[in-house]
Image: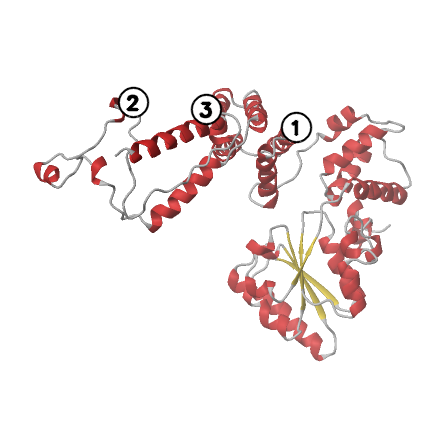
Amino acid sequence: MPNLFSAAGLENHAPRPLADRLRPTRLAEVVGQEHLTGTDGALTRLLRSGSIGSLIFWGPPGTGKTTVARLLAGETNLVFESMSAIFSGVNDLKKAFDLARARRENGQGTLLFVDEIHRFNRSQLDAFLPVMEDGTITLVGATTENPSFALNAALLSRARVMTFHSLDEGAILSLLARAEEVEGRPLPLDDEARLSLVRMADGDGRAALTLVEELWRAASEDEVFTSAQLQEVLQRRAPIYDKSQDGHYNLISALHKTVRGSDPDAALYYLARMLDAGEDPLYLARRLVRMAVEDIGLADPQALGIANAAKDAYEFLGSPEGELALAQVVIYLATAPKSNAAYVAYKQARKVAKAGGSAMPPKVILNAPTKFMQSEGYGAGYAYDHDQPDAFSGQNYWPDALGRQKFYEPVERGFERDIRKRLAWWEKLRAERQENQ
């Protein structure tokens, strides 16, 4: 009787995860990345040219970066060697480079796959440069972070970035069909539950297959789950994104732009996505306050107060009740008239202030607390606006060195339409009163 606890026994009987068993053996079997691996894909074209060069694979987890790197090594007859930047240091790099040099002397090339390459520091990334340049290794680095920010320019100048996309519904459904074929049994799901499973995977193929394994383990013979039962059985997890990485910035950008674009339904969707993923609601509240001042401004002066009130309501109520206050302000801001006039005016004023920050205000609007300052003309001729007709003097408030400037241009929307009329009236009075002086 074989010893199942021996090393050999463990190796022979070790279960392989479904994601590993379904790993593609050819580039054509990779799903969801047709722009790279399809007939006219970028990687397919490189392979046809006979040389792939060093590459950076950028994309979310579970999109096939490691698999494609392994397949490229096979297609180009290179030895595949892999490491993770999380667990590797300078000594590991030196060892990998030495092995690659030894292979090269024997006429064998090396494809070095580095997962999470953005985890390396600048000096570690610089260590790749000479071995990339002399052909000792073909580097394929994988990262979930934007290479423009996560990697240094020297490395990027020597490698081509390939973008991997989250798997769409069709790609995930294709994976589920392949899983059923390999296992020889259908998923215990009705049609609606099948689509729910796709949404739970959130574009991650590996996550989809892990959920499939959990599902088969949970199902009794002939049991078929509805969407509601599926969520109960799998204890549905939130969509995956790392709040410190690209997913966070992509979704807050989407929320901001949909509010600015006056689409309350899309804005609510992105708000729900972020809350569902565990985003800090107070971070979202702060961003909503910013949207109120940047994109609505004085077109609706109430927007800022309402955004602040939503923040206070969330702090008072907490989750989940306080989330409704955030949803309410998202709807309010998305449906409010839009103006960035105050935002633009402030930026222009800052620019002029920096350029002419030492310009002296006209003496007429300066106080004269001493006799000397009075003798110097401080405050002389100042017209108190409340004593003037229409409570408007029309006097000059600008430094002589600068002359009158124009920053604020209210739009013809919302409350700013009234402000625009008011400013035009004052401009007319100013011209008349300066003409009569």
Front residue of this view, candidates 293 and 42: 293
The kind of residue on which mark 3 rests is Gly
The kind of residue on which mark 1 rests is Asp
Front residue of this view, candidates 87 and 330: 330
**At x 67% / y 50%, what residue is drawn?**
59
421 w.r.t. 340: above or below: above
Residue 87 visible at all: no
Which disc is residue 389 wearing?
2
Foreground mark, 3 or 2, reads 2
Foreground mark, 1 or 2, reads 2
- Distance between the Cα atoms at labels 1 and 2? 49 Å
Residue pointed to by mark 3: 305
Q: Residues within 10 Å of mark 2 (few under 14, many from 20)?
A: few
For marks 3 and 2 on the same chain, the one whose residue lies earlier in the sequence? 3
Label 3 residue SS: helix
The kind of residue on which mark 2 rests is Pro
**At x 84% / y 55%, what residue is drawn?**
28
